[in-house]
Image: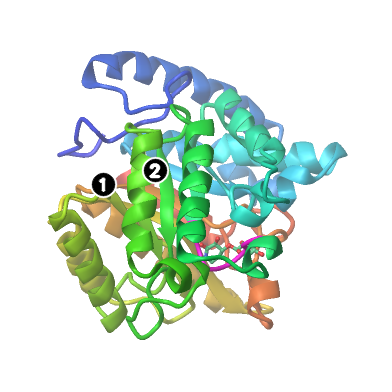
Amino acid sequence: MRAGSRVDRSVPSCGHHRAPTRASARYAIIAVGLLYLGLLTACASESPAQAQGPARQDSAPLRVLAEQQGLRIGTVGDRGFRLTGEAGSRFRALASREFNMLTPENDMKFSRLRPAPDVYDFDWADSLVAFAEANAMQVRGHTLAWHNQLASWLTAGTWTEQQAEALLDEHVTTVVAHYRGRLVAWDVVNEAVDDDGRLRSSFWSDHIGPVYIERAFRAAHAADPDVALFYNDYDIEGLSPKSDSVYALLSELLARGVPVHGIGFQAHFQLGRLPATEEIAQNFERFAALGLRIHVTELDVRVPIPASAEELTLQAEHYRAIVAACLASEACDTVVTWGLTDRESWIPAAFPGWGDALLFDAEYRRKPAYWAVHELLSTT
Ligand code: XIL
């Protein structure tokens, strides 16, 4: 455990879904030890091709190393979790062996949960949460108020301001209450600030105005007073007009007593475009100084495909730098990668010509980025 670890740094271990106290640390260590033994057995059955060399076959899974650092390390569940047969088993086994946190990539978004105005479909999201619980993984909820992936019945409808407020209140309240006591965090508001640092135009801001942000946080807090509530956004890891705007927004919300507990840095990076390490550290610390927890919520580093060996080496350095930035900040205890393997990643569809953004390649082999994170967590 690194020096200065705080009591509220939640270390997931079997049976714990909330931050354990120091009193439970001894049991957590025993649980982690048992888990490690089980995971070593799983590693030993991996083929040499999957493990990239026999010398590394019996290395500790990331989650075991992360737990020793008081860090949650996560992945997302979506397409891979839906695979059936051997492919699905392989995907799920890898996810639960290496990671101690899971975020639903799409299943808790409005369009998935709300096929019709009076219908909530929690089936897929529930199955992900159940999978996480069965595998001692903690869950981040994602996301309640966003401009994308809204249902067409919502965006195509005609609504007054009061109706939109009621829709937001009802959605947030129902979804947060459904998972009350089972999640460690919610991305309550996602990407409310546009690339220029202004309030983004969206269904919610257009109908309700900027106050929709505060409204969503207050409704979420009323529905589950114990879950940590996050504002989540991209391209705010460094110092920029956009991160300044998010800083101003959260400062103002906190000054008025709005229940915001953390900031999520999505960390969707492009190779060669990582802000300087000192800049990330400075930015993290100004948010931490507001009293906010820090999560790195959607980490990936996209590379022009096919990636060269040099590019994968640089990618590994980027991964090492961002995980190190989290470890260096007292406020940061969570890093989630936005996908398990390059086979299921959202990148090729969203950014044509780009890909290879994750820790595992399309054949489920561990990449240099995996080993960079592994080494960092082993030696810090
Ligand atoms: C992405 C998913 O990964 C894709 O599968 C989906 O088609 C679109 O959304 N910021 C976010 C995430 O907050 O929810 C987005 O996820 C990626 C960008």
The reply, left or right, for residue 312 in relation to residue 49 is: left
Residue 16, label in figure: none
Q: Is residue 55 visible?
A: yes
Residue 26 x %, y %: 30, 15
Q: Quadrant of ligand 1?
A: bottom right
Residue at image location 56% in from the left, 73% down from the top: 302
The reply, left or right, for residue 181 in relation to residue 110 is: left
- Label 1–label 2 contact, CB within 8 A: yes
Q: Residues within 10 Å of mark 2 (few under 14, many from 20)?
A: many
What stretch of residues is rendered in magenta?
Answer: 145-151
Query: Residue flagged by tag 2: what amino acid is it?
Result: Ala
Residue at image location 62% in from the left, 63% down from the top: 149
Q: Quadrant of the N terminus?
A: top left
Alpha carbon of mark 1 to alpha carbon of mark 2: how far? Answer: 9 Å
Counting residues from the N terminus, which is met first, the one under dot 1 or under dot 2?
2
Q: Please give the residue where the numbered disc 1 appears in the rendered image.
A: 259
The extreme bottom residue here reads 196
Q: Is residue 74 visible?
A: no
Q: Please give the residue where the numbered disc 2 appears in the rendered image.
A: 220
Q: Quick check: is 221 in the magenta stretch?
A: no
Quadrant of the image occupied by residue 267? bottom left
Quadrant of the image occupied by residue 4? top left
